[in-house]
Image: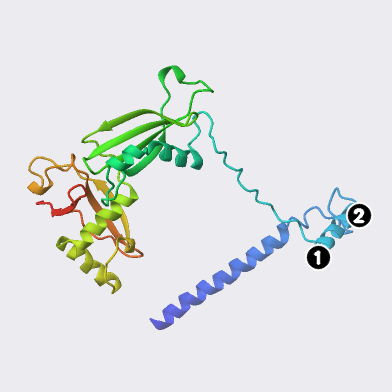
Amino acid sequence: MRNIVHRHLGKMVAGTTIAVAGTAVMVAVTLPGTAGADDSGTRAGQSAPQAAGAAGAGEAAAGGRAVAPGVVEAAPAEGQQGKGRDPLTDDELERAEKIALSRQLFRSSESVDGDRGPQPLGVDLAEPEADEAGRPDAPRRADVTFYDYRDDTLVTRTVDLGTGEVVATGTQHGVQPPLSRAEKAEAAGLLIADPLGSGLKADYKDATGKALTSPDQLQLSGAVYRAAPGAQPAVLDQCGEHRCVRLFPKIKNGPWVDARQLVIDLSARKVARLDR
């Protein structure tokens, strides 16, 4: 059997050698530099002076004259004020939130961590009015949203970026927009501090050999949880009116941790486990 294997291997190697030799012959015959060459070594259709000039250019390049490097141009500077339906500029985002957060709103509201002032959620370019659609001179407005944890109210204030004034204010209850990064971090902090977070901390310890003490040690995704009849313990029945979170934590440079059965009520600052 050993001799048979060697014989087959010898045939394969020999066949490969023949194939390589054949390929080398083919390359030698079809090299583009030799096709159509005349006896003087110049290409067909090219005079000797032209060939000499081309050779001289090659020698000059080889002689050290560097080719100028490509230039990457910087992105154009972003203006302070956008135009039409352009996305809001960084300056507009900052100004809109500052204008929307009036002194009265700041003093009468509460953020996710219990500090004074509402929780910022986002700033978006407002839709134009019906009679403004398509107008190049239509005013640019921004919708600034906050969540007031004092009474679970979503506050939306519309800012006219041209005049710098708040032109509309709306409040809603039971409306839960996507979570901000700060809210997910606060939810993780509550979970880590709660006895129901012991499984998360044990998984983190197993994966890293270190203790989990801060949300900064995790990559956090999450979704708003809304109560459904009979789907959760009584402590979570107000989720929807309250701002509640299901977290999907991931250990940095490590695995995801399954925490889907745990819900954090940010309004009541409590953690509970779903029955199923």
The quarter in which the N terminus is drawn is bottom left
Residue type at numbered disc 1: Gly
Which residue occupies 16% across, 43% down? 239
Label 1 residue SS: loop
Q: Earlier in the sequence, mark 1 or mark 2?
A: 2
Q: Secondary structure at mark 2?
A: helix
- Residue 50: x and y in percent read 89, 52
Q: Sort mark 2 into few (<14), some (14-19) or many (20+) by Cα contacts within 10 Å.
A: few
Which one is in front, 127 or 71? 127
Q: Position of residue 156 (x, y in %)?
A: 33, 34
How many numbered marks does the figure carry?
Answer: 2
In the picture, measured across the screen, residue 81 lies left or right of residue 182, that is right
Callout in the foreground (1, 2): 1
Residue at 92% over, 54% down: 49
Horizontally, residue 27 falls left or right of residue 184, namely: right
Image coords of residue 244 (percent x, y): 21, 46
Q: Where's residue 155, x and y in %? A: 30, 35
**Closer to the camera in the image, 25 or 271:** 271
| Nearer-the-camera pick, 270 or 259 | 270
| Residue at figure coordinates x 63%, y 48% from the top left | 74
Mark 1 burial class by Cα count in 10 Å: few <14, some 14-19, many 20+: few
Against 252, residue 172 (above or below) is: above
Q: Residue at x 10, y 45 (%)?
A: 231
Is the residue under label 2 in contact with that under label 1 (CB below 8 Å)? Answer: no
Residue at numbered disc 2: 48
Mark 1 → mark 2, Cα distance in angstroms: 25 Å
Residue 123, compared with residue 235, is above or below; it is above
Q: Quadrant of residue 26?
A: bottom right
Label 1, on which residue?
A: 64
193 w.r.t. 76: above or below: below
Picture layout, residue 226 above or below residue 261:
above
* Of 57 and 24, the residue lying toward us: 57
